[in-house]
Amino acid sequence: MPTYCINQSPLSYGFENDTPPYLSFICKAEGREAAIPRIMHQHSDRCELMFVCEGSGNYNIDGKNYSVKRGDILLFNAEVLHDENPQASDALLIYSCGIEQLKFVGLPVNYLTARAQTAVMPSGDSYAEIRAIFDHIWRQVAQKQQYGREITRHLLSALLLLCRSIWLKHQQHDTFASLLLGQRVKNYIDERYKSDISLKSINAALNANPYYLSHAFKDYSGYSPKQYQTRRRIGEAQSLLLSTDLGVKEVAWAVGYDNVNNFHRIFLNLVGIPPARYKKYWLTGQIQS
């Protein structure tokens, strides 16, 4: 009978000061109706981990475009902009969780990996293990089981350490040259997305060839500069609808739209439901025709 002793290997540093992270939420998106896009946004107080059990989608994380599929793990470090577009299907099943107080040795707070690493990683042989952990966390939280808080804390720690080991095993760093121009365009738009921005103004500010700039940013992000600006505005609008008491008109003005009808049309086109119904959906969990 094989026997393994866990203290034979040298200690690998995990959470700094042995302080465990905290689960702020867990979400289970299941079925076609749950495939509601969450346009460009970020979180300052937490990181998020997402696992595609079944389904696919297109996600933009820190300006880079990813086509995700079954078994992929998605990481949204704190303060990193991300854009979520799951593909609507009856088979869709995606877990996501928010994590606070995460601190690995050598990384900023609420970072699972260095920012230069890829934000999406296939789970590979760990698919069943990761899915089982998410299933157990969901059951503990949803059913409020006895000792659920302690069990959840240990399950979350196991999940994070497992995912971090997967990233460390397959470390990938983008080259500086391939990121430079795309990142500069992204930074320029992020700082001014509520104002009118033209390709001409970006070219002038960055002293770049207009044709090359547009193609370089599309290769980098998956969007044209105008599309990226629009998604930043609508993503901020979603955040304001969910976190404030502002009406649709005030939200439109706050993100840079003078014409409320234009805002309503663009929001509907990107999110799939009008702004007012979007807010009601997140409050009630129901979409009404």
Image (cartoon, helix red, strand yellow):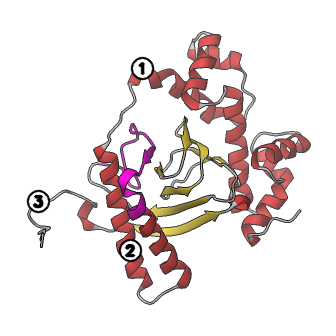
Q: Helix, strand or loop at disc 1?
A: helix
Give the CA separation, mark 3 to mark 1: 39 Å
Q: Helix, strand or loop at disc 2?
A: helix
Give amino acid for label 1. Answer: Ala
Give how far across and how far down residue 74 sits, in percent: 49, 50
Q: Is residue 245 left or right of residue 288?
A: left
Give the residue at mark 3.
Answer: 9
Q: Split into 4 quadrants, where in the image is the N terminus?
A: bottom left
Q: Is residue 144 left or right of residue 279?
A: left
Give the residue at mark 2.
Answer: 153
- Range covered by the magenta-colored residues: 107-130
Asked if residue 50 is positioned above or below residue 190 in the image, the reply reads below
Give amino acid for label 2. Answer: Arg
Q: Nearer the viewer, mark 3 or mark 1?
A: 3
- Relative to the observer, which residue lies in front, 276 or 121? 121
- Relative to the observer, which residue lies in front, 185 or 65? 65
The numbered dot on residue 177 is 1
Q: Helix, strand or loop at disc 3?
A: loop
